[in-house]
């Protein structure tokens, strides 16, 4: 998030003490405003629709609607992002949360600095997956993807052969510099290819691209 840009935040957690502490922490940070609190998933969805916050901090384990059900209810609300808060999460749950629309996942044991950094990153249009890199999230997707050994047909969504190579490199965890060296291109040319790929696939960053590519089998998963 750029300096000076505020964030209106909705806190959704079923523990009042945790919500109080989180509100105090966030409102001490310039530019952050807590506009509401929800104690269960159903209330979180209702208040999000009513208050239209910029960001929802959503506990995964809540009564009435679970965090997962709330994510489904929050999907499609314009100009609003969600960060999942959780005591523990495995790769399958992490991927599921991202596929349901979460923009970030933060463990409750994380430091204040990590939480604030995650909020700023998500508000800047990025994903936040804590200690997990794009490569590890993609590996989790590969592990969970159904195997179709006899099916070699893949849609290319209008991507050129070079762009498909770039997509494969992103999934493999290459940086722009790595790709420039691998394909004997300038880094600026790599950036141009990425812009074209993002536009064609309707994604906005490398993690979205990796998720899309793996879900749609744009590249081999083995």
Image: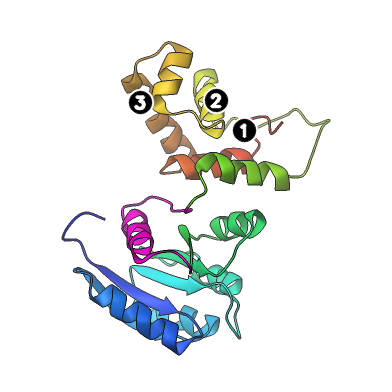
Q: Residue furthest right?
A: 150
Mark 1: secondary structure: loop
* Span highlighted in magenta in the image: 109-130
Q: Is residue 155 above or below residue 27?
A: above
In this rendering, does residue 193 appear at all? no
Mark 3: secondary structure: helix
Q: Is residue 182 above or below residue 93?
A: above
Task: Quote the CA–CA distance across marks 1 and 3.
Answer: 19 Å
CB under 8 Å between discs 1 and 2: yes
Label of residue 128 in the image: none
Instruction: Kindly identify which residue carries mark 2.
Output: 164
* Place of residue 25 in the rendered image (x, y in percent of width and height, measured from the top left): 30, 75
Viewer-proximal residue, 178 or 124? 178
* Place of residue 12 in the rendered image (x, y in percent of width and height, measured from the top left): 45, 79
* Place of residue 140 in the rendered image (x, y in percent of width and height, measured from the top left): 65, 46
Specify whether residue 145 is painted magenta: no
Instruction: Kindly identify which residue carries mark 1.
Output: 218
Task: Quote the CA–CA distance across marks 2 and 3.
Answer: 14 Å
- The residue that appears at 43% across and 87% down in the rendered structure is 17
- The residue that appears at 53% across and 84% down in the rendered structure is 40
- The residue that appears at 57% across and 60% down in the rendered structure is 97
Task: Quote the CA–CA distance across marks 1 and 2.
Answer: 8 Å
Mark closer to the chain start, 2 or 3: 2
Q: Is residue 106 above or below residue 128?
A: below
Instruction: Kindly identify which residue carries mark 3.
Output: 192
């Amino acid at each position: 998030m750029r300096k000076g840009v505020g964030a209106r935040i909705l806190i959704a957690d079923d523990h009042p003490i945790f919500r109080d502490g989180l509100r105090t922490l966030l409102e001490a940070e310039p530019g952050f405003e807590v506009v509401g609190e929800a104690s269960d998933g159903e209330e979180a969805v209702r208040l999000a629709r009513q208050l239209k916050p910029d960001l929802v901090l959503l506990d995964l384990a809540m009564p009435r609607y679970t965090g997962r059900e709330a994510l489904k209810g929050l999907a499609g609300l314009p100009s609003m992002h969600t960060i999942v808060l959780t005591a523990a999460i495995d790769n399958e749950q992490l991927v599921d949360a991202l596929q349901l629309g979460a923009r970030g996942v933060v463990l409750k044991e994380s430091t204040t600095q990590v939480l604030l950094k995650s909020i700023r990153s998500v508000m800047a249009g990025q994903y936040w997956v804590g200690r997990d890199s794009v490569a590890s999230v993609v590996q989790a997707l590969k592990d969970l993807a159904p195997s179709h050994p006899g099916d070699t047909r893949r849609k290319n969504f209008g991507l050129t052969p070079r762009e498909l190579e770039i997509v494969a490199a992103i999934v493999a965890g290459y940086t722009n510099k790595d790709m420039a060296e691998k394909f004997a291109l300038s880094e600026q040319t790599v950036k141009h290819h990425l812009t074209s790929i993002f536009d064609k696939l309707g994604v906005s960053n490398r993690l979205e691209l990796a998720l899309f590519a793996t879900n749609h089998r744009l590249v081999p998963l083995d």
